[in-house]
Amino acid sequence: MLEIKNASKIYGEGTSKVVALDNISLTVNKGDFIAIMGPSGSGKSTLLNVIGGLDQLSSGEVILDGERIDHLSENELVGIRRGKIAYVFQQYHLLPSLSALENVLLPLTFAGGSQDGTGEKKALEMLQKVGLRKRAEHKPSQLSGGEQQRVSIARALVNNPTLILADEPTGNMDQKTGTEILSLFDQINNEGHTIIMVTHDQRVARHAREVIFLKDGQIVERVTNEKEGIDGKEDNLLAKVR
C-alpha cells in the first residue's frame, strides 16, 4: 500500500547542508505495524513527515495506494491527509476550547461529512472505542494526558484512514498509561489499520511487527518482531545506530 523509492531529503546547502534522508527505499504492506528507531537526527521524524506530505522530498518518490503523492500540491495533499492518512503526535494537538467530541468531529467537519447528523454518531462511536464515551463533553484541560491521547487517536480514526502515522505517541506518559495506549494501537492494528510509529523506546517497539533502524538518514536494519520480541537483538542493533 505504501512504497518509498530512493527518497532523499536535504536541508540547506554548502557548509550548512544536512542530509536528513539519504536514498531510502521502503515498502509497507496493508496491515503492517512498523516501528522506526534510531538516534536523534537519524531521520525518523523526517521520514514520517515525507510519507504524510508534511515535508517535500529533495528527490525520490512516495506512492500510496498506487498514487504518487510526493509531487502533489498542498490542496491535493490536504485531501489525501483527510481521507487516507492520519497523524498521532507526542503532543496531542487538541483545541482547548472544544470538547472531546468536538475535537474528534473536526476531521469530519473539514471533509464535509458531519452535516447530516451522522458525524456526531460516528465521533461518539470512536470515543466509545477508546473508552471515553462518558467524557465526550469534557474539554482537554479536564482530561489526563492519557485521556487526551485517546481523544487524538479517536480523531485519527474517525475518517477511517488507510495509514496511521504516530510520532512518539507515548513519549509524555508514565509506563502504565503508555502501555494502555499501546494496547489501543495493537487493537487498531488487529482491526486492519496500517501503522508506522516513530519511537526511541524498546518497550514501545516490541508492539510492532517490524522494527526499522535508521542511522544518518539510511536504513541500517529491518527486523521482524516475532512473538517473543526482538529481545537479545536490541542491544546489538541499538549499538549499531548510536
Image (cartoon, grey):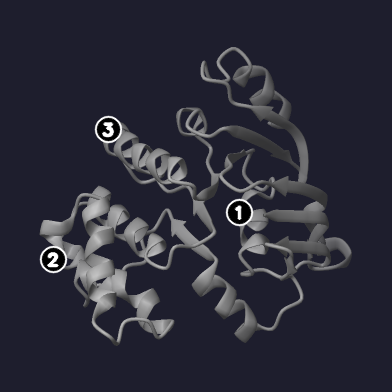
Q: Position of residue 25 (x, y in %)?
A: 81, 49
Q: Is residue 130 visible?
A: yes
Q: Nearer the viewer, residue 220 or 113?
A: 113
Mark 2 surroundings: few (<14), some (14-19) or many (≥20) residues within 10 A: some
Between marks 2 and 3, how big is the CA–CA gap?
23 Å
Q: Is residue 95 visible?
A: no
| Residue drawn at point x = 27 percent, y = 77 percent | 118
Mark 3 surroundings: few (<14), some (14-19) or many (≥20) residues within 10 A: few
Residue 176 badge: 3
Between marks 1 and 2, how big is the CA–CA gap?
31 Å
Between marks 1 and 3, how big is the CA–CA gap?
25 Å
Asked if residue 151 is positioned above or below residue 114 in the image, the reply reads above
Q: Using residue 240 as the reference point, say whether residue 184 is left or right of it.
A: left
| Residue drawn at point x = 69 percent, y = 50 percent | 43
The image quarter in which residue 112 lies: bottom left
Nearest to N terminus: mark 1 or mark 3: 1
Residue at the spot of label 1: 45
Q: Nearer the viewer, residue 208 or 170?
A: 208
Amino acid beneath label 3: Lys
Mark 2 secondary-structure assignment? loop
- Quadrant containing the N terminus in the rendered view: bottom right
The image quarter in which residue 39 lies: top right
- Quadrant containing the C terminus in the rendered view: top right
Q: Position of residue 51 (x, y in %)?
A: 66, 61
Q: Nearer the viewer, mark 1 or mark 2?
A: 2
Amino acid beneath label 1: Ser
Q: Using residue 27 as the reference point, say whether residue 37 is left or right of it.
A: left
Residue at the spot of label 2: 138
Q: Position of residue 106 (x, y in %)?
A: 34, 76
| Residue drawn at point x = 82 percent, y = 62 percent | 17
Nearest to N terminus: mark 1 or mark 2: 1
